[in-house]
Image: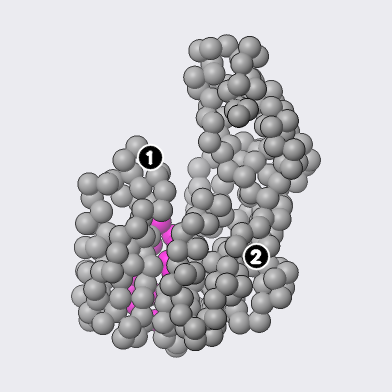
Amino acid sequence: MVTLKKMLAGKIGEKQIQHLTTSYDIIGDIIVLEIKKELIKKEKMIAQALLEMHKNIHVVCKRVGIHKGAFRTQKVKIIAGEKRKKTLYKELGTRLFVDVEKVYFSPRLSTERKRIMEQIKPGEKVLVMFSGCAPYPCVFAKNTKAKEIVGIEINPEGHKLGLENIALNKIKNVRLYLGDVRKVIPQLKEAFDRICMPLPKSAEDFLDVALLATKKGTIVHFYDFLHEDKFSEAKEKIRKACLLAKKKCTIISVNKCGSHAPHVFRICVDFKVI
């Protein structure tokens, strides 16, 4: 199998190649990767090698910042291929327009979307907080018999792409709202059978508003980033929020959804309001 390191052997020095990041995200026909400072002068060579390896890829971008701000977006720079950052991504029977700079999106969460999708029962009402360009709502709508799916996103660009994706997939049972979940959820005055909270770094700050949309039997999917020795902290955050909201809950499961750093994982705690 041809690897990136093999493609670059002889072109980049042995010391430099040790700094090569060999994992990268493929989103539609765009590759997004990290180029370490030791390899900046070789970035175009690396990008060209990726284009040769992946014939269906037309754009290579490098990350030039971290995910930040309320919109969780990340700056990227095109280093090879076509001059665009929007692409068409396919997942579980859905097609999704994604702008890799204007909206937060992770193809690495496809397994997690499938895991939740497989739990949705016919007739459920599902709320997706921080819905972005609507990957969760679209995947759920196309692959389940949910009665209705509601998505809320604060980023206007993400919301706009979400509306495009609903139309692209000819979905009728999804409602998307542009706004802050803290303002939108109280206005909805609805209770849901299932709530997804795919905002790992600060989702705990929104547990109180999520619980406003629960009823007896609601299942909540709560995300967090934690060291493997501290998974119990996520459970404690949930218990405290439920206590303040005067609701009872039971923890169903703790699921690893990918690594964030050595021994630090993105986790999803599934819990039920009882």
**Residue 93 position within the rendered picture, expressed as x and y whole percent measured from the top left:** 64, 65
Q: Farthest residue to the front: give it.
A: 1
| Towards the viewer: 24 or 241 | 24
Q: Position of residue 89 (x, y in %)?
A: 67, 55
- Relative side of 89 to 153, left or right: right
Residue type for callout 2: Thr
Q: Is residue 204 a member of the stretch shown in magenta? A: yes
The x, y position of residue 104, in whole percent, is 56, 55
How is the protein colored in the picture?
one colour
Mark count: 2
* Span colored in magenta: 196-213
Q: Does 227 lie within the magenta span?
A: no
| Disc 1 element | strand
- Residue at the disc numbered 1: 261
Name above or below for residue 63 compared with residue 40. Answer: below
Residues 211 and 149: in front is 149
> Relative to 48, is 137 above or below?
below
Visible in this render: residue 112?
Answer: yes
For marks 1 and 2, give the one nearer the viewer: 2
Which residue is painted at 52% across and 81% down in the image? Answer: 146
- At horizontal 53% and vertical 36% (from top left) the residue drawn is 23
Q: Is residue 259 placed above or below 166 in the rendered structure?
A: above
Residue neighbourhood size for the residue with mark 2, other residues' Cα within 10 Å, grouped as few (<14), some (14–19), many (≥20): some
Q: Is residue 208 left or right of residue 160?
A: left
Q: What type is the residue that disc 1 sits on?
A: Ala
Q: Which residue is mark 2?
A: 94
Callout 2: SS? strand
